[in-house]
């Protein structure tokens, strides 16, 4: 009986020793992230980009200068992105008399449902994945008009 226990111990130590030696000559499982950026797949879901000039505008195919605002035509805005966001990360706020979406990346689950349902293509996804911040206010994407966004 004592011989059987000795054989079991020898056979148990042997595979562990072989595995430890094998791991000394393999590549590490981790990457050197801050210094070496990873190669991302093409369908990576990252930070959202909101283009205010495209929101609530109807393009008739006559160029970027020929656009009409939906609010002027129908009396209301689209609100599809706010309605379809499962995490309630999009809230409609008023900017310069027009209602525009404000995206809270702190609540966003990056499902990109707003990207798929936006009829004007005003919300787009990128592959920017570094969203670390010390201030939660910096993760709220507030819609702002710039001089080049303003329509004539």
Image: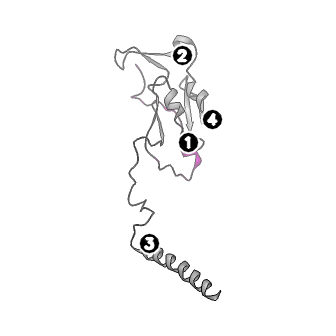
Q: Residue at x 42, y 61 (%)?
A: 31
Residue for badge 3: 23
Q: CA distance from mark 3 to mark 4?
A: 46 Å
| Within-10-Å neighbours for mark 1: few <14, some 14–19, many 20+ | some
Sequence-wise, which precedes: disc 3 or disc 2? 3
* Picture disc at residue 71: 2
What count of labels does the image hold? Answer: 4
Q: Nearer the viewer, mark 1 or mark 3?
A: 3
Which mark lies nearer to you, 2 or 4? 4
Q: Is residue 60 left or right of residue 110?
A: left
* Residue at image location 47% in from the left, 50% down from the top: 130
130 over 69 or under it: above or below: below
Crowdedness near tag 4: few (<14), some (14–19) or many (≥20) residues, C-alpha within 10 Å: some
Which of 13/58 is in front? Answer: 13
Residue 103, image x and y in percent? 55, 36
Looking at the image, tell me whether mark 1 or mark 4 is earlier in sequence order.
Answer: 4
Badge 2 element: helix
Q: Residue at (52%, 11%) from the top-left corner?
A: 73
* Residue at the disc numbered 1: 105
Q: Earlier in the sequence, mark 1 or mark 2?
A: 2
Tell me where residue 45 appears, x and y as whole percent. 47, 41
Residue 88's disc is 4
- The answer to which of marks 2 and 4 sits earlier in the sequence is 2
Percent from the top left, x then y, of residue 4? 61, 83
Q: Which residues are magenta?
A: 129-152
| Mark 1, secondary structure of its residue | loop
| Mark 2 surroundings within 10 Å by alpha-carbon count, few (fewer than 14), some (14 through 19), many (20 or more) | some
The answer to whether mark 2 and mark 4 are in CB contact below 8 A is no
């Amino acid at each position: 009986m004592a011989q059987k226990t000795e054989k079991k111990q020898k056979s148990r130590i042997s595979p562990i020793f072989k595995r430890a030696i094998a791991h000394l000559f393999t590549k590490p499982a981790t990457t050197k992230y801050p210094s070496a950026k990873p190669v991302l797949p093409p369908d990576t879901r990252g930070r959202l980009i909101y283009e205010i000039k495209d929101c609530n505008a109807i393009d008739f195919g006559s160029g970027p200068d020929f656009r009409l605002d939906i609010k002027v035509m129908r009396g209301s805005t689209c609100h599809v992105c706010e309605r379809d966001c499962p995490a309630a990360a999009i809230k409609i706020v008023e900017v310069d008399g027009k209602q525009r979406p404000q995206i809270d990346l702190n609540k966003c689950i990056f499902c990109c449902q707003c990207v798929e349902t936006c009829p004007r293509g005003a919300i787009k996804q990128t592959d920017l994945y570094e969203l670390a911040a010390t201030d939660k206010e910096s993760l709220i994407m507030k819609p702002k008009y710039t001089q080049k966004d303003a329509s004539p």
